[in-house]
Image (cartoon, rainbow, N blue to C red):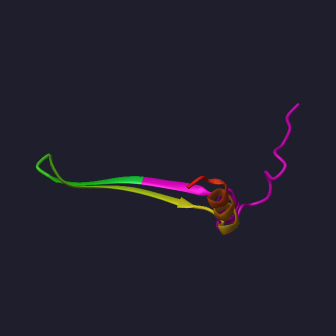
Amino acid sequence: MTVAAPHADRPVALIDLLDRLLQGGVVITGDLVLSIADVDLVRIDLRAVIAPVAAAAVDAATQPL
């Protein structure tokens, strides 16, 4: 007996996916290295936290200074 997922037949729009991700918050990380002849010239580490304003305000209010 197989059980189908509750929303298996419903297509998911990109905006719905983004909305669901942003409700809980998202952390985006990335590394960029520019090099010539195997010599690293520039290295950039990127980190971004995207969260709803209400969640960020609650987190800021509960953090000690």
Residue under the image location 39 percent in, 57 percent down: 46
Q: Position of residue 25 (x, y in %)?
A: 63, 57
Q: Quadrant of the N terminus?
A: top right
Q: Quadrant of residue 54?
A: bottom right
Q: Quadrant of residue 47?
A: bottom left
Residue closest to the far top: 1
Q: Quadrant of the C terminus?
A: bottom right
Residue 35 lies, with reference to residue 54, above or below; the image says: above
Q: Position of residue 34 (x, y in %)?
A: 22, 56
Q: Is residue 47 magenta?
A: no
Residue under the image location 62 percent in, 60 percent down: 60
Query: In this rendering, would 2 be left or right of 55?
Result: right
Q: Quadrant of residue 16?
A: bottom right
Q: Position of residue 32 (x, y in %)?
A: 31, 55
Q: Is residue 21 magenta?
A: yes
Query: In this rendering, would 7 be left or right of 31?
Result: right
Query: In this rendering, would 51 be left or right of 38?
Result: right
Residue under the image location 79 percent in, 59 percent down: 10
Task: Compare residues 36 and 59 and report the one nearer the observer.
Answer: 59
Residue under the image location 54 percent in, 54 percent down: 27
User: In the image, which residues are magenta?
Assistant: 1-29
Task: Compare residues 57 and 30 and report the one nearer the observer.
Answer: 57
Task: Compare residues 56 and 21 and report the one nearer the observer.
Answer: 56
